[in-house]
Amino acid sequence: MNDLHEALRDDVRMLGDSLGQTIEKHLGKKFLEKIERVRKLAKAGRHGTEKDRDNLLTELKGLSEDEMLPVARGFTQFLNLANIAEEHHRVRRHQEICDLEAADSYVQLLKRLKKEGIGVTQIQQTLAEMQVDLVLTAHPTEVNRRTLIQKYDAITDCLRGLDRGESEQHRLKELISQIWHTNEIRQVRPTPIDEAKWGFAVIENSLWEAVPTFLKRLDEQTHAILGQGLPLDCSPIRFSSWMGGDRDGNPNVTAVVTEEVLMLSRWMAADLYVRDIDVLRAELSMYNCNQELRQRVGDAPEPYRQLLGEVRDSLVCTQRWIKERLDQESEVSSVLCPMLTPDKLLEPLMLCHRSLVECGMEIIAEGPLEDIIRRVGCFGMTLVRLDIRQSSDRHAQVFEEISQFYGLGSYIHWTEEGRQAFLLKELQSKRPLIPRGWHPSPEVQEVLDTCKVVAEADPASLGSYVISMASHPSDVLSVILLLREMGISHDMRVVPLFETLDDLDSARDCVDALLSVPWYKQYTHGHQEVMIGYSDSSKDAGQLAAAWGQFKAQEALTELCQAHDVHLTLFHGRGGTVGRGGGPSHTAILAQPPGSVDRSLRVTEQGEMIRFKFGIPELAVRNLELYTGAVLAATLSPEPSPKNVWRDQMEKMAETGLQAYRSVVRHDAQFVPYFRAVTPEQELSKLPLGSRPAKRKADGGVESLRAIPWIFAWTQIRLMLPAWLGSDTALEAAVRNNELPLLHDMYAKWPFFRSYVDMLEMVLAKSDTRLTEYYESRLVSDELKVLGSSLRHRLSVAVEKVLDIKQRKELLVDNPVIQQSIDVRNPYIDPLHFLQAELLYRDRNHPDQRLEQALMVTMAGISAGMRNTG
Ligand code: PGA
């Protein structure tokens, strides 16, 4: 292991040196020396005296407007290169660990389940029925441009080559030079179509290869332990997408965009299959085949190639058919037989498979042919299923305009009962509701147009229709009615997203009211999906109260759906960072309430996390395995329910935490001015990260700020407030009341509480009050500094209490890898923070294009250093 750490250090040094040479070549020896000086001072500033830190600040303050950008770029790119080396190292280490059969591996899990007395058939069946749906979103948390990500990936390839003893030095230099001479900040915002294409590229570049590898391994391991593998076309994991479908607060995602994205994903799928079939055709040159295939292809000398040739033609036809639609060519298609369903593709492939096996060529059948069959099982003919998301008030607005048009009064002023009665009556009526000759507002028209696109789309290309900020049954019924009005012919999953604390608390009652309506229950076909919003609830109530609210809501929904005899799928809207419900997926799954993970689960995968988890095939395979194992374990061997004393304690702490959080965020008049002054919140909205605006309402205040920039802003100044504010007070009160032994017990035995404490610890370890204090000293008026210092004090209380619970003297002592990674990065991130504070100060006083550019680079660099944005 030590050798491996040495290897990581060597890689980082080599990449850093190469970056240094590039900078020197571009900006001269003197400039490189300046950067080196800053780096050394930063290092000394971390480990030395106040004086070293002062020297660093003096050096940075002395930089001219023109020097700030290249200095910021130097540190930012260094951090990016360090990330690549670390990522590569993780894969390298994983390979080693794999060889040693890691304790958390899938094989160990199967053995454990068997030992616990769970029957082989039950395990098999659970695997065959398992539906883990990873939903790729376009959430704007990836700071890196795609073109740079591609170069970073190429560097990873070089590092692998070097490990194999190949000579890659020249290529590495070339890539680093390309990176240095490329602007790291996007000039324009990506469009939703760009975002969707980005999602397809992740599939093309990584998941397309990873999925069959993962499934094959799963099959082999299952076979080895249980004596029976998995059906060839079984895929416990699938992918959905929000890219081009999520229009919540994003006016750029229109009905036209969604329609185009639906077509593009089909095109992309067909294209990838054409490439696969070409490879397969080249390989399957055999002449021997079974009777069935012979009958199909007549006397063709190479029967497999003959049949695959037809498959290829159909796929190419499909692409033409799609292109005609994308180009909006003639209404009547010239293409006769597009291949639109997975069965059409599977049928000939399975025929080839049977024939090869029957003719004694199993070994050939198990090659690329099985890979393609497995891909069809996972990706179908549409690659991903597109979800739609829209906010509940936009649907209500449609009914408001309709009710006004008919002179029925104002829908939004009706009682909930009144709305439900109206919607249910209309849902069961045979005549249409939408008036002829009615001219709705453009916003309402857009909602209707979207519903029409959805209604007309192939059901296999669609996932769920998610309603954000859902509270009441009418929010769900109204969407079903709109889809029906637009002519949908299947019962699409319409999913409430509960994302405030109040809505989480009343989620059970809402779903109960729905399932108690016989019409609705029939509509569900025995399956209810509910989405839990992690980040907005945390922003609303603070992390502690929100986490408890989420837990209780899921528990109550699980019980409720069992009582209604309806299968529940929980859809977790988690972000990458802790304040947005992030953290290791398998830990999170195992920490869910018992019974709530029952074979199915949906979860969002966002921004940079998509790259970290699925960007490289090896890592993707690993993460797919982790998901499968965690869902299998949580389904078959759930943790026991928490004890009542634990629940009572949690209830009490959540209440204290909630009051403490809101008394600052909502009720302290100084809070918003402090937030605006000390963080780069306002400036962040200029960073063109994604297609959607930073706020739900353009003229809204902090309450309308989306959860991502909210957390992003606090991360940049290292106060990490959303992740701990409230926990400090709650934990302190518990300790004061002599409840520490109880907290120890909860930590030791309750995965939910353990995961909450461990995540809190991780965020606290990333906080740095000295840096926050520096931002304050540069940017905040004296009057607001009082709040700042109280917050910093509270953060230190949170640290103390976490250490009390963990019975440790320092944060992260049990997790030296993360601690080391934070320590190594700090000297490189520090100059970026100091620069950022300086830039904010200068730009707020004398706005300047050069400063803004440098400011954005510091934001990107700090995100790279912290390994996520917000
Ligand atoms: P949302 O997501 O703002 O789209 O609901 C929040 C998040 O992912 O943190």
Image (cartoon, rainbow, N blue to C red):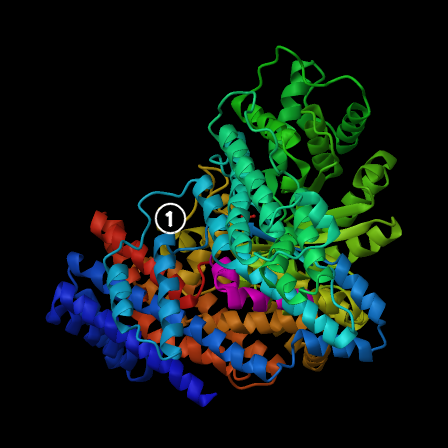
Is residue 583 visible to the viewer in this orientation of the structure?
A: no
Q: Nearer the viewer, residue 47 or 690?
A: 690
Where 760 sits versus 96, above or below?
above
Please state if 325 lies on the left or on the right of 683 as rendered.
Answer: right
Residue at x 29%, y 55% (from the top left corner): 855
* Magenta residues, start to end: 607-628
Measuring from the top left, give residue 156's x and y in whole percent.
39, 68
The kind of secondary structure element at disc 1 is helix
Q: Quadrant of residue 736?
A: bottom right
Magenta-drawn stretch, dominant element (helix, strand or loop):
helix
Measuring from the top left, give residue 469's x and y in whole percent.
63, 42
Residue at x 71%, y 67% (from the top left corner): 650
Task: Say if the magenta span includes residue 624.
Answer: yes
Is residue 4 visible to the viewer in this orientation of the structure?
A: yes
Residue that extends furthest to the bottom in the rendered view of this protein: 2
Residue at x 76%, y 67% (from the top left corner): 647
Measuring from the top left, give residue 367's x and y in whole percent.
60, 63
Q: Nearer the viewer, residue 14 or 604?
A: 14
Label 1: how many Cα within 10 Å (few below 14, some 14–19, many 20+): some
Q: Quadrant of residue 420?
A: top right
Where 490 sits versus 186, above or below?
above
Whether ligand 1 has any atom under 8 Å from the Cβ at mark 1 is answered as no
Please state if 141 lies on the left or on the right of 224 as rendered.
Answer: left
Q: Which residue is mark 1?
A: 682
Q: Nearer the viewer, residue 124 or 51?
A: 124
